Image (tube, rainbow, N blue to C red):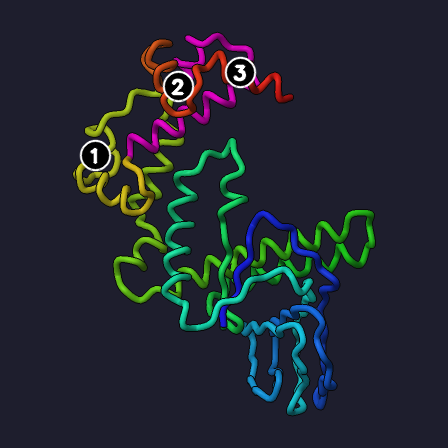
Amino acid sequence: MYLCYEANLLPKIFCMNQNRAEEGWLLPPRISSEYIFFLIRRGHMYLEENGCRAQLAAGDMMVIFPGSTYQSYRPSACEYYYIHVESSAFETFDCAEVGSIQKIILENKQLFYRCDPFNSELYEKSKLFFPKDLHIGDSSLFHQIDRYMQEAIDAGKTREQHYKLICSCKFLEILSAISLYFSAETFHDPESRALIHGSKYTRKIMDFLLEAYPQKITGDRISRELGMNFDYLNRSFKKQTGVTIFAYLNQIRIQKAKELLINGNLRLYEIAEACGFCDEYHFSKAFKKETGSPPSRYLRQSTDEQ
């Protein structure tokens, strides 16, 4: 069974904490009214849900579904985290739908590269997938989740005014980290795994473009920077992102221009120069093609909305 969380909602956390159980400990029978996440930090937990038994060890995560009866079926000693989340927080998928899940994961991967950070598309379309039970074999990821949990628990202990919001945000960070890990582990064919894991060249290209976008950038320059044939790099980049290298560079320049239009007082020719366009004419033409409005109208619309 798989769970899906839509990123445009803030999860409501009823409680999240840590428990250290001594040898001989047993979790008594209970019925859940919400989703319950168990994450084992040390030791073992022998957990039964609706008659189905699971032996959990350090690094294991298991989700109890609303309406389930759960309990320990064997005494143990363990240290674990638990998180109680509202029953309407997740959509569920059965194991037969893994193909559909993989398709959505790949679409989300490319959405990240293509989306405009000045709109709400990522909130509306991003989905976080993870299985009902998962072993987190990456020690650095486990330490990262461990840190998020401790920060959330500390916020809960202080009972500051907005501690619930802090707990929800930390839980979102945990879900994001788990979903990325699951996405990387769920594909078995080489091409899909390469798309999810990402190419080292794609990351290097993105880093280069983000740093050098104000400058003149050519295919030859990118080829020299990475020591690879540009056509090969461009094909690989498009497989990863869904757009070509120069389309992505144009997105970066337009996004930087939006920032300067909204938050600065530069003239259009100065913005064009700062963002890597050869002149104001080419800047205005590219901006209108990307956004549907020339820069001056975009600025007026943004000002009116504020």
Q: Which mark is residue 299?
A: 3
Which amino acid does the dot numbered 2 rest on?
Lys
Which amino acid does the dot numbered 3 rest on?
Leu
Q: Residue at x 56, y 80 (%)?
A: 56
Q: Position of residue 96 (x, y in %)?
A: 40, 72
Residue 57 vertical position relative to residue 216 in the rendered view, above or below: below
| First of labels 2, 3 by sequence position | 2
Which amino acid does the dot numbered 1 rest on?
Ser
| First of labels 2, 1 by sequence position | 1
Span shown in magenta: 245-274
Circle 2: element type: helix
Binning the other alpha carbons within 10 Å of mark 1 as few (below 14), some (14 to 19) or many (20 upward) gives: some
SS majority, magenta: helix
Nearer the observer: mark 2 or 1; the answer is: 2
Give the distance between the C-alpha atoms of the residues marked 2 and 1, in whole angstroms: 30 Å
Residue 260 located within the stretch drawn in magenta: yes
Q: Position of residue 296 (x, y in %)?
A: 48, 11
Circle 3: element type: helix
Give the distance between the C-alpha atoms of the residues marked 3 and 1, in whole angstroms: 36 Å
Circle 1: element type: helix
**Contact, mark 2 vs mark 1 (Cβ under 8 Å):** no
Residue 65 vertical position relative to residue 126 in the rendered view, above or below: below
Q: Residue at x 22, y 42 (%)?
A: 235
